[in-house]
Image (tube, rainbow, N blue to C red):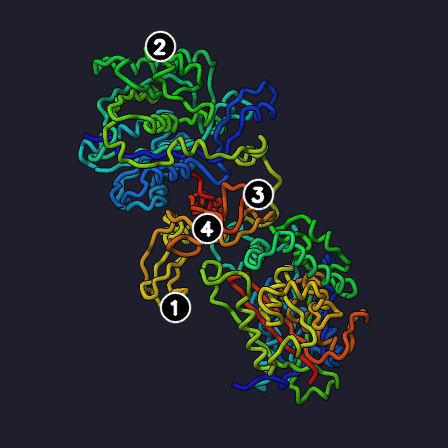
Amino acid sequence: MAGIVSYGAYIPIYRLSRDEIARAWGGGGRGGEKAVANWDEDSLTMGVEAVIDCLNNMNRELVDGLYFASTTPPYREKQSASIMAAAADLRRELVTADFTDSLRAGGSAFRAALDAINAGSAKRVLVVASDSRVPAPSSDFEPNWGDGAAALLLGDSETTVSVEDSYGLTSDFIDIWRRDKDTYPRTWEDRFVITHGYQEITKQAITGLLQKCNLKPSDFSKLVVYGPDARSHSALAKSAGFDPKTQLQDPLINTVGNTGAASGLMMLIAALEEAKPGDRILWAIYGDGADAFILKVEGNIKKLGDRRGIKRHLASKMMLPNYESYLRFRNLLEWEPERRPPEEGSLEIIWRERNAILSGRGYKCHQCGHVQFPPQRICMWCQAKDDFEEVRLSDKKGTIFTFSVDERAMVPVLPNVLAVVELEDACRFYGQLTDRDLDKIDVGMEIELTFRKINEAGGVNNYFWKIRPVRC
Amino acid sequence: MESIKDKVAIIGMGCTKFAELWDWDTDDLVVAAAHEAFEDAGVEAKDIQAAWVGTMGRMSGVTIAAPLQLQYIPVTHVENACATGAESIRGPALALAAKAYDLVLAIGFEKLKDYGFSGLHPYYHDTDKWHPIYRAGSTAPGKYALAATRYFARYGLSRDEGKRMMAKISVKSHHNGARNPKAHLRREVTIEQVMNAPIIAWPLGLFDCCGVTDGAAAAVMCRAEDAKKYRDDYVTIKGFGISIGPGWGKTKSDYDYTSWTETEHAARQAYEMAGIKDPRKELDMVELHDCFSIAEAIATESLGLCPKGRVKEDIDAGSFAQEGDLPLNLSGGLKSFGHPVGASGAREVYEIYKQIQGKAKESSRQLENVKMGLAHNQGGHPGRFQCGVTIIGAP
């Protein structure tokens, strides 16, 4: 029977306080904060972070499927899952799919992965949910929505959480929508959308599942369910017969924000971080109806080991100094045109060098044993020709050898920090340092690599590896 | 192999004003520099048998043949990034030594200012491997600053000490350039002004970076045995060196950013040809490639003019000022004189040429008894340099 083998999550390092949003637009401060993806992040890069957290030190060759769920994939037409698979250095014999258009997408992807494994057409499938939704500036959504990602590895063996049963409900109820011509997601009257839509539909899914399995709320240690805001979330739990104080998983709204399609999975991972073997969890993902699952935590969850998950990512943060920096991160204003010529792209180069660029692989020379990056046919060290094997560098940590802080570089958000780092047991890497406190950067600082968007030269998203201080 | 020492002579040179020459295009630069050189040599354009042109921003020999109206002679376009100037002198020297021609023109020029923004056009960053990903977000100051940070860390300089060391270099160069009529930035600056200037790429501030300049410099050359036909106070080439590194120092862990390996190699080639054993003593002046103040500091060490890691002592002692024992960048350097990329190598030679002849302007900059000088010209960035060194002197 298919179940959850491993989990991982990701919360961007930057946070914007609600008080600061209120400072920008007026109105009272509301306390709390939301997670804001850096300018070089999107739902795809955040998903990769969650995948790598999930896979930890596992043999990546074993993964045979990757399903990506998001309402904000970077392309309208072009699969994200395939790019994520390359970044995670998974094998090419892989089934990839994007699930999109609905808050429910993570649930749909989870169900599809479960069914694939139970049908015997896959053995290890990653389900990744990630969202970086941009609410209309000064809207009610703006203080409430945040960015994040989570990943679950489903498998047919060594499961740490089993899936006992599931229930699915569809609904054509319209609450939040976005058409091609809409810049920002739109909604309708609060009371209609939340009370009549979210609360009633989600409650139906929960009670439908309970009836199907002949279980009561008191049979569960936790209810993990999507919530658009804290109050209606609590009200929904109560109406379904659960105790909000003892059974309701924190919706992360005051610390991360409502993360859309990622929300249900992120909350589940937070619950699993605290769960004990034997715990039963009712997990419901709302959106165009709802998916609901009964999960049972197994004994070998103890053997899973550490993940950065929700807890450690939550604790590791930097506050954005002001609302204006958020506007720059999300590129929400029309800026003065750049006079320098735009950077040029090349799909030929990106394709030819995909192993180095996306999968972060360098060459190890067979003759002298040195590792080098970027890959070179003639070894930089011993000048041997074409005698190397590929080695993955993207999971290595290291230290800063030297750096500079460039105030005039052509990047969307200045300054650009260039860093030369020594990767342990490997080689030197040269690139941009992101997610950093400028006052704390120094020679010798410990760093790791992170998958980010470099630019949009050539009209495509050019992804590559950047450097950051070890996150947590 | 034979040494070229004293086989080739420079018999005339010209140099435009280096500045933001809004009213001049590349043709104007070429005509001005070349004709000043022709006049200085006492020759005409029709006497030139072959020419070498060094420029990064334009293609082909026609770029000087057209404005000068050279009539169907060989013209070679040379380029080695910011070391282009050195190439423009070396090519004709080899051709003369081979007796392929008897009278040649070497000219370097660059028009950097027609693009509408301050700073270098991104094209000039192309010494990095052309790549949509690896080069993204990098600039020349950003890449040179990597060397400054590492130099401070390696030799135990605090941020203040390091910034101050670099500031003293710019102050010295501006003091020289302020007295040089053809220089771009002719104003004195103080250490405080340099240290407090806006940051371009930490730790380099605005006054640690050379300006963006238009200009051209030219030389008329012949074999030394023919030089007396043109003038008595000709200057000969004593030696040169060109070194192109294997280019991946940025990511090769045995390169530590605190020295310029290519400069060491080019200098060694040039010193050997010139028969120089102790450059600090035997050279009377050095024009070196100070696109950034840290570049001068490290080039000084890599040229063997002071021990590694100790340039600060000499800077503090004033060894490289006009009154010191080895003036560096007496012209004002790239910092104050300006750096039109293709012209700088030839321009550095122009300063030494004039000093040897006793014709430095303003006269307060004239050194006594100049017999030999070195021009250091460097393109690329730490880990990936192209370096040209030219040594000229009295015959």
User: In what element is the residue under mark 1?
Assistant: loop
Precedes in sequence: disc 3 or disc 4: 4
Q: What is the C-alpha distance between the residues marked 2 and 1?
A: 72 Å
Label 3 crowd (10 A; few <14 / some 14-19 / many >=20): few
Q: Tell me, yes or no, whether dots 3 and 2 are on the same chain.
A: yes
Q: Amino acid at mark 4?
A: Thr
* Residue name at image x 48 percent, y 23 percent: A144
Tell me the residue that label 4 is attached to: A399
List x then y, in percent, for residue A341.
Answer: 57, 50
List x then y, in percent, for residue A365.
Answer: 34, 62
* Residue name at image x 24 percent, y 43 percent: A62
Tell me if label 2 and label 1 are in contact, CB under 8 Å.
Answer: no
User: In what element is the residue under mark 4?
Assistant: strand
* Residue name at image x 69 percent, y 73 percent: B285
Tell me the residue that label 2 is attached to: A239
Q: Nearer the viewer, mark 4 or mark 2?
A: 4
User: In what element is the residue under mark 2?
Assistant: helix
Q: What is the C-alpha distance between the residues marked 4 and 1?
A: 27 Å
| Apparent side of residue B300 relative to residue B360 in the rendered image (left or right) | left
Numbered disc total: 4
Tell me the residue that label 1 is attached to: A383
Q: What is the C-alpha distance between the residues marked 3 and 4?
A: 17 Å
Precedes in sequence: disc 4 or disc 1: 1
Q: Amino acid at mark 2?
A: Ser
Precedes in sequence: disc 3 or disc 1: 1
Residue B382 sits above or below residue A79 on the image: below
Precedes in sequence: disc 2 or disc 1: 2
Q: Nearer the viewer, mark 3 or mark 1?
A: 3
Tell me if label 3 and label 2 are in contact, CB under 8 Å.
Answer: no
Q: What is the C-alpha distance between the residues marked 3 and 2?
A: 50 Å
Q: Amino acid at mark 3?
A: Asp
